[in-house]
Image: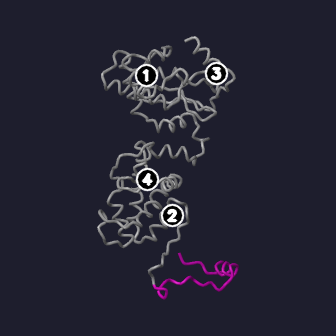
Amino acid sequence: MNKIVKTTAKRRIGKKVPRATFSGTLEVGEASLPCYVLDDGRRIFSTKGMIESLGYKGNANAGEIFSSKGLQPYILAHNNPYEEAGLIDFVTDRGTRARGIDVEKFMDICHAYSEALEGGELKGRHDVAARHANAIIRATSKIGIIALVDEATGYQYTRAEDALQFKLKLYLAEEMRAWEKTFPDELWRQFAKLTNFSGEVIKNRPRYWGYLVMEYVYCTLDADVAEYLKNNKPPARKGKNYHQWFNDDFGYKKLNEHINQVIGMARACDTLEEFKKKMDYEFKGKPLQMDIFANVPIETAEKPLKIDTTFDEALSKIAKAPKPDK
């Protein structure tokens, strides 16, 4: 044991200690978690705050807690997220030394508690901790925790809003979702109306509608995510679709909300050209140039008023004109 400690100490000598550039407190249910964003971009919770959020005393020995008999198998099943060597030594924004744990590893610990509770393996204070962990899981998620920490610390205002990796993590799941009926039949009915398609839209849709989906669903939702899907499309076989890559916590919800907006826009349009122009205006910032008199014969359309006088002459005539009777 001593040899291991000495080796670890030697490794730490000369190693640059990261500093917290942002800090804040994340309120999750009844838990208050001090959180930090380090100068290398890592998001962490303080180990003391982590312990207290689970209902233990702040001075409790985390190593002993997480190695308890009932919890240990579940901790190991999550690749042992709490390891002494994996803890992060850092300098707080106040200049003091502290120790923290990566926010995603903390969520793995919460899930280990939840699974141990379901298995009936926990008693006493560990049972209470598992209930705290479940409350934290309900209030957040592994994907959403990053966005929440950024908001709590103010880092969201510094992070590039179009940072591709952040958006991909927020929108897309690490593994493809199980198939669900994501696109409602009403979307296809509206596409049929706009493209004058008279076939059965539920069973037999034109392949070129895939362009409409990519251009006016995915691209108007987020162009970077759409580009990623284009370049990393799923294998060409039944049951593998782009929407299966959206995570349940954020991306799938946003996708459904956006589809409903697209349907509403399509209902308000009579032609595909009108739909495209309105979508480009609403979601891409392009100027709206609708053909107001498109269906009016040229000979019956109202002609613009021709003014055959100068601006100064017109003003002079207005000034000399008799006042109307009251």
Residue at image position (33%, 50%) is: 180
Magenta-tinted stretch: 297-326
Helix, strand or loop at mark 3: helix
Question: Based on the displayed image, in which of its 4 quarters is residue 160 positioned?
Answer: top right
Circle 4 or circle 2, nearest the eye? 4
Residue at image position (53%, 20%) is: 84
The one nearer the camera, 47 or 115, is: 115
Which residue is denoted by mark 3 in the rendering? Answer: 11
Q: Earlier in the sequence, mark 3 or mark 2?
A: 3
Q: Residues within 10 Å of mark 1 (few under 14, many from 20)?
A: many
The one nearer the camera, 185 or 148, is: 185
| Position in image of residue 200 (x %, y %) | 29, 67
Q: Are marks 1 and 2 in contact (CB under 8 Å)?
A: no
The alpha-carbon separation of the residues under discs 4 and 1 comes to 40 Å
| Position in image of residue 92 (x %, y %) | 62, 25
Magenta portion: prevailing SS class:
loop
Which amino acid type is shown beneath numbered disc 3? Arg
Task: Kindly give the residue lying farthest to the bottom in the view shown.
Answer: 299
Residue at image position (35%, 27%) is: 115
Q: Earlier in the sequence, mark 1 or mark 3?
A: 3
Q: Earlier in the sequence, mark 4 or mark 1?
A: 1
Q: Which mark is residue 234?
A: 4
Q: Earlier in the sequence, mark 1 or mark 2?
A: 1
Q: Are marks 1 and 3 in contact (CB under 8 Å)?
A: no
